[in-house]
Image: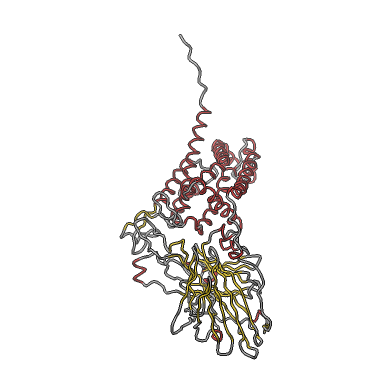
Amino acid sequence: MDRKGIITLLVAFAGLMGLQWAAKKIYPDIPAPVATNSVPTVATRIAPGATNAGAVVNIPVLTATAGPPPTLLTASEQTLSIGNDRLRAIITSRGGGLQVVELKDYPARIPLNRRERSKPNELANLNKDSFLPAFTYANAPALTEDGHFNLRAINNGVVAEKTLTNGLRLVRQFTIASNYILHVTERIENASSQPLTVPAQELVIGTASPMDPHEKQDSTGVYWFNGEDVKHIDTMWFANRTLGCIPGTARTEYVDGTTNVAWAAVHNRFFTLIAVPEQPAAKVISRNYLLPAPTKSQLEADGKLNPHPEAYQTALAYPEMTLAAAGVLERKFSVYAGPKEYFGLSQLAPRLDLVMDFTGITGFFAQALLLTLNLVHKLIPSYGWAIVGLTIFIKLLFWPLTAISTRSMKKMQALQPELQALKERYKDDQQKFAHKQLELFKKNGVNPAAGCLPMLIQFPVFIGFFFMLRTAIELRGETFLWVNDLSQPDTIFTIPGLGFIPLFGVAGVGLPINLLPLLMCASSLWMSSLTPVSPQMDPVQQKMMKYMPVFFVVFLYDYSSGLTLYWTVQNLLSVLQTKLTKMNEAKESAPPKTLAKRH
């Protein structure tokens, strides 16, 4: 790369960094929540009389099976609810736990097009398809017995309590805070006159399951944070496939942690439930269970249904303990149950924003793009037009790089006869040919790498868009022109009877017509027809590059329309730049005009 190219690259990168800094200044972070809404990192309190009976590493863990886990069956079930303007949490007497959290600002499903109707009053929810309520014990019959707890309402909360036959008394208190925060206090009291053993506990913090029957399994999973790094467990880990495709022995249970579990979370594509203990838990345990699969007739009627839905029940593990007479064991938790919204989560400690998976270089670009998109949205109150505006800005930022690339490729084309002559002259000495070729490039000021520069620079931006739009709750339900939801495909209509078409058809439904991927493909082909082809590229590679947009259509046809909108606008701007470049070159190469002599 020549000096000008390097300087341009550095200026473009500095521009992105400066944009992020400016956006934070203009679009300030969400103020830190008040004490009742914070997720603290403090120590668990163990009252006098409670002692550890064994090392944490000796926590017994039961081996899971592919079938459903044991459930708590009670003769009758009582429920009480607590809530605020953002959520409604339902507490059940079945295990004395959190049955479900409903999110008042978000419908359960967004219709693919405006002819469909969403179900009124059906809200997005967390933990609905769980086998056990959150904050109940799994695999601990000695701590559950018949599983029935007594519920009573308190100010801004609910208390669930139960006295076991051996004299242990279990008390859980659920209180609502502001926004999406709940507080949970768990107490184990020894009401007897002698020491009692508290067996090892697996305290379920929630179950990750698809919120929509069409949601793919790779959108759900489990995160946990050890104070330094975050780990993500999903269907790929449980499937245990080599290179992601070669079948292996499936796993059913994940166990990790060495008294360092700062928090654990279950999530689907847009929402998450995060449990933050005051003191790091001993271990995190997650098991996958098969959910009821759609029947053959249901799959024939709707081929988009997830054929193998799974759920990941996740728990925090604690060791066996001995509780002296009148001893009390108390643990407190802060719980976030809400959308995976980066700016809100980034204000909550410790690092709850890590559930967004904005890590590594792709995460950096995804975070920067999301920040910038929200900045543009403050100026343009439409996320569709905000994507258009952001794409224009990115194109202007990389405009000089594209111009350098175009000039370099034109110079390469002009040198093609000389290159061909060198190739014939040194066809038996490739080393000599490479040396002479470099001399020719240097003499004419040609940089072969410059032709790939825009693609190399824009690829991380594209990947950043891809990762950002996977979980961007901001785009969910946002309309744009004919698009009903920027986080889903822009299906304008479906042709019935064509569900048999490979890759695009949906069995039992038909052929969905998604307009933006088709426009993206057409604009990509238009752009490639105007772009000079590198002379060094062999004919086979040239054809592959020319028809690469077709492969991307297959890949992105059912993806978020926000991404295909970005790519389509980017292609159209590239076509515009190519046209303007050719016009300027034509003006520069035109002979100077002279004034005709008057007779």
Q: Position of residue 299 (x, y in %)?
A: 37, 68
Does the rendering let one see residue 121? yes
Task: Answer whether residue 249 is visible to the viewer in this image.
Answer: no
In the picture shown, does residue 292 fall above or below 492? below
* Residue at x 50%, y 34% (from the top left corner): 582
Residue closest to the eye, 6 or 449: 6
Colour pattern: secondary structure
Q: Quadrant of residue 284?
A: bottom right
Residue 424: x %, y % from top left: 57, 41
Q: Position of residue 306 (x, y in %)?
A: 42, 67
Quarter of the figure that contains the C terminus: top left
Which quadrant of the rendered structure holds the N terminus?
Answer: top right
Horizontally, residue 178 falls left or right of residue 47, namely left
Query: Which residue is at the far front?
Result: 155
Residue situated furthest left in the rendering? 497
Q: How many marks?
A: 0
Q: Quadrant of residue 33?
A: bottom right
Q: Residue furthest top?
A: 599
Along the line of sight, the residue nearer the viewer: 529 or 195: 195
In this rendering, would 48 be left or right of 112? right
Residue 43, x across and y down, in percent: 67, 72
